[in-house]
Image (tube, helix red, strand yellow):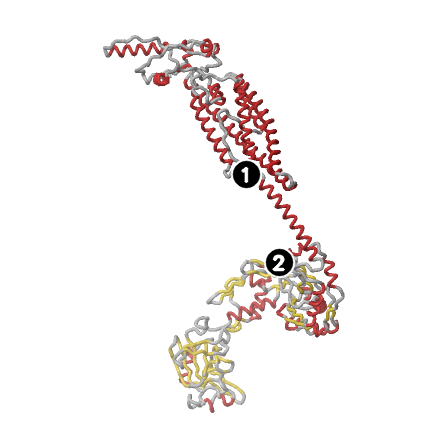
Amino acid sequence: MSRVERKRLEKEAKKKNKTRLFKSKEKEVKESEESLEADESAKLPPRLDASRDKKVDDNIDFVTKKIEDRFIARESQNDDPIKKGLENNQNSKNELKMKRLAEMGMKTADKIVSVEDEEMRLKRRRAYLDSKNEVVPDDKPPITVDDIRTEEDINLGIYDRPQVKEIKDIDANLEADININEVKHIDIERAPFEDVVKVVESRIAAEKIRHEEQKKEEEKILKQEQIKKEVLEKELRERERLKTQQLNLDMGQDQAPKPETSSKKKGWFKRNMDEKNQEEVKGLDQASQSEELSSQENKAEEVKAEEKVQEIKQETKAPILVADEKIDSMGDLPKKGGFKSFLKKLCIFLIAIIVLVYIAGCLVFKDRYFVNTSINGIKADLKTPGDIDKLASDKTANYKLNISGRNDVKDSINGSDIGIAYVKDGSVAKIKADQGFLAWPLAFLDKTNIDGKLNVKYDEAKLNDVVKKLNIFDKKYIKAPVSAFPRFDEKKKDYVVDKGDLGSTPIEASVKNFVASSVKAEATKVEYPASAYKAQKNKADDKRIEKAIAQLKEYDKVKVVYDFEKEKYVAGTKDISTMFNVASEDDYKVELSKDKVREFVRSLSRKYSTYGDAREIPSASTGGKLKVTGGIYGWLIDREKETDYLYDLVKAKKSENNRKPIYAQTAITRENQDLGNEFIEIDLTKQHMWFVRDGKVLIETPIVSGNPNRGDATPPGIYPVNYKTRHATLKGPGYSSPVSYWMPFNGDIGIHDASWQPVYGGSRYLYAGSHGCINTPYSKVAQFYALTKEGMPVVVHY
């Protein structure tokens, strides 16, 4: 150890005016447990004697009396006794712990001043005084290991030992952690005080042992406090059990006086406590003897003794008594188990109530129908069979049946039309007998509908006549069912199974049976069931549909791209799939249909053919926009030829890109409403003609059109120029006229010169008009001929 440590220890020794004694830490701890009020100056381990046994007995009697007093006076306390008792135990625990820790101190041999240390100190002191020119005083002999006072010396009455003079000026930096037992040549194992003094080899080892023993002491205190707490809880449970037993006795024997019961409880408790106290005292004696016989070298026996004490304390189920612990009045402790007892009684009470309610229900429903019961649509809750007889009879007097079905069909039957009547024959009583009365609680969980068991009669011949006239048999409401079939879904981009259509084709026999059963049940509003209609032949779960889909998917790669100049149309899987017949009403055979291919071409023509469409032109006649209808001008797909071509293409599973369909007629262009940038405009009212290009008039002339008074009026509309030629002869019924320029645009109607016309324009066409052609002055017709192209539009209007 260092000199600083020695100096500190010497100062403390001087201050307390007493020498250090080597004392076993285990003995000090046991002293603290047995008597905390013993004389601190003695510091010798007490021995078990008669006085200690008497003290333990007194403590046990004291605790027993306290517990019995609290048990008898349990109702007089308002405080929480458990909390108060635990607080007192906690305070005692803290005081005991602090007192024991204060008294614990390891005395080791390295704290003893050796002869060698004293000689070194004296030499340093003399050197220091010589340097100060001071006189060296006479020093007393130093304290050595021979000055240790052992238990043997105390027993022999040797108490005197020399006083240690205060040592000053010790170097604080000098380390002295050495084994001074070897320096002083002390044989610790053979020392006469080995059972009293524990000597360790160094300060570090001493500190380690001190820490371990302090930890063990704290654990021991915690275990003892835990035992106290468990014992208190067990005591409370025992008291609650006694209280419950007493309560049961009070309920069963009201004549027994309460004071006598309390006395019996008290005597019973005291007898049990006496037995427990005897066992506890016996255990304490055994524990004390084990503690005195245990030594430092045999710690295993000490631990075994402590475990034995712990086991005895748990078996006794009595409070742990501490020597210095004083038990104050803890008040009446609350009794456990009361809530369980209350629940038990409550359950018994509820079961009794349920049984009574069930019996009462059986009595009520013995002659009455259950709740949620309906008979022929009549609510029969808590009604008697007589009540139902009356209600059923009243219902048939004004009976009417309304029926709805598929395809929004509506039918109705009046009771008077079929001679309906109710017969009282005891059928309602039989329904009640079948229902019984024991199962009435189950009726609250679900509804019960009893139909068709009442004796309701009707005229069958009249009913058959009424059924034949129902709207369900009207053709406008009948639709044949369609079996499930495969189709291509545009959103999913795949084939799916279409469930088809249930249809609305009625089955006469099924309809009659359904109507008859509805009348028998006195139903007022019903709907035709699925059994009244013809069912689908094949449903969506038919496995043959998947096989058909696999065949259709073989054509998924077929693609035909049509070019219509301004836009293109792609005939892909969606359109190709519509060209096949799938025998969904038979065996789902897949076959390419020319009729369905033709239907596709028609739909293509309706969208992209402009033949005869109305158009709006920049009119030279009006100076603005003019809408003209009629005529045969425009694009027209040849449906038959295109159908044949497309059928062969799909059948061969071939594709084609930028396909131009086969046309029966074409227009000059697809720009500007197929008119292009030039056209010929003829105004039949003004009897005038213009050649218009890019919205400007290049040539204009008066004309003479067909004579409407002879039925030869020129038809209005837009027409294409079929062709143009020179020196043609126009022939007709009763005439033959040669012309120099001929440009037909509507069959035999065209533009040509007319040398026989002296004048043009005005109203001449009304009396000297042509057979429908446009007569044009010779000087102008040549210019029109030069500008006109085959296929360009000729717009004729009034």
Q: Position of residue 749 (x, y in %)?
A: 49, 82
Q: Amino acid at mark 2?
A: Gln
- Relative placement, left or right, of 444 versus 23 is right
Looking at the rendered image, the quarter that the N terminus falls into is: top left
Q: Secondary structure at mark 2?
A: helix
Position in image of residue 744 (x %, y %) = 48, 80
Query: Of label 2 and label 1, which has the lower sequence position?
Result: 1
Residue 551 tag number:
2
Where is residue 619? Give x, y as percent.
41, 79
Location of residue 426 (image quadrant): bottom right
Q: Position of residue 27 (x, y in %)?
A: 48, 18
Q: Quadrant of the C terminus?
A: bottom left
How many numbered dots are placed on residues in this image?
A: 2
Distance Cα–Cα, label 2 vs label 1: 94 Å
Secondary structure under the numbered disc 1 in the rendered image: helix
Left or right of 260? Residue 38 is left
Query: What residue is disc 1 on?
Result: 75
- In this rendering, the answer to whether 309 lies above or below 149 is below
Closest to the observer, 528 or 356: 356
Q: Which residue type carries mark 1? A: Glu
* 549 and 773: which is toward the camera: 549
Which residue extends farthest left?
133
